[in-house]
Amino acid sequence: MKRGRFSVEETQYIEQNCEALSPEAIADHLDRSASSIATWIEENVGLSAKQKKEVEAHRELKQKPYWGELLKQFSESELELFQFHFKKMWAQFKDDVFHTEEIQIVDTIKLEILMNRILTSQNENLTDIEATQLLIQVEKEQDTADQDRDYISSLERQVSMARAAHETLSKDYKDLQTRKAIMLKDLKGTREQRIKQIEDSKLTFASLVKQISSDPTFRSKIGMEMEKMRLATEAEKERLSQYIQYEDGQIDQPFLSAETTKGGK
């Protein structure tokens, strides 16, 4: 990876592509670090609102208490991938990420990295199987008298073990994929529910009247609730209009009005 000052050609390429391409894509093309590209864009070109949010998320991540643990858990290339997904997911949301949602984001990215590890191991495993099978083929092509049967048996056992490991990796990958899908669904559902509550809290009287007039289902729901409230009010009014005896022995009506006044006592 190149270091040092950007050349004129590099700065021109960055200026021409910073809106269309991410800093990571530009960095790959120029063989530079993504952080240096992002810094140069921020200082010399200016950032869009989304890019600013990504840069801010990238900076905040390294200030998080769990960043030190991530350094211990993942390799340098995996950390680059983690930072990429983190800032993209963070920028996708508004500036109201709760702590529980933040943990869900972190755990989702961890699962993504673990899935990538499995795919890498599977690829290496398949390469080993192909190489071992080639050795078996070469050995079997010799004359029968010259073949090393023990060597062939050993290689065949290696292939069998590698295939068994491949199956295990496939199962582990599917399990992680299922967990990731559930986590993303939970994250989406949690945020949608919270956003709906926020939007509902912003409902004005004018927008409520408009919704009642334009939405028959909502109008029917509101009408049923109002009727239930009216019936409950009438029932409670009737109950409180009856004479009751208090602890001091007096008898009276808790709810007294011209409509509920009763003669006698």
Image (cartoon, rainbow, N blue to C red):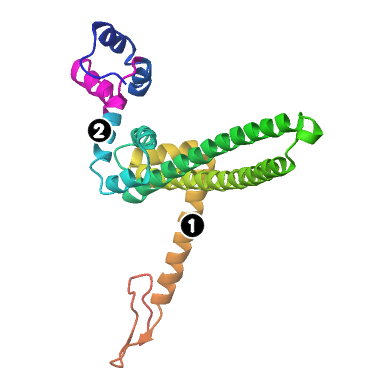
Q: Which residues are magenta?
A: 30-52
Q: Amino acid at mark 1?
A: Glu
Q: Amino acid at mark 2?
A: Glu
Q: Which quadrant of the rendered structure holds the C terminus?
A: bottom left
Q: Report which quarter residue 230 is drawn in.
A: bottom left
101 relative to 135, above or below:
below
Q: Position of residue 33 (x, y in %)?
A: 30, 24
- Membership of 36 in magenta stretch: yes
Q: Residue 183 or 247: which is nearer the viewer?
A: 183
Q: Report which quarter residue 54 is drawn in.
A: top left
- The secondary structure that dominates the magenta segment is helix
Residue 117 tag number: none
Residue 192 appears in the figure: no
234 relative to 5, above or below:
below
Q: Residue 167 or 113: which is nearer the viewer?
A: 167
- Membership of 4 in magenta stretch: no
Residue denoted by label 1: 227
Q: Position of residue 14 (x, y in %)?
A: 29, 13
Does residue 227 appear left or right of residue 102 in this picture?
right
Q: Residues within 10 Å of mark 2 (few under 14, many from 20)?
A: some
Residue 19 appears in the figure: yes
Do the CB atoms of the residues marked 2 and 1 lie less than 8 Å apart? no
Q: Residue at x 71, y 40 (%)?
A: 152
Q: Residue furthest right?
A: 144
Residue denoted by label 2: 56
90 relative to 12, above or below:
below
Q: Position of residue 226 (x, y in %)?
A: 46, 55
What secondary structure is marked by label 1?
helix
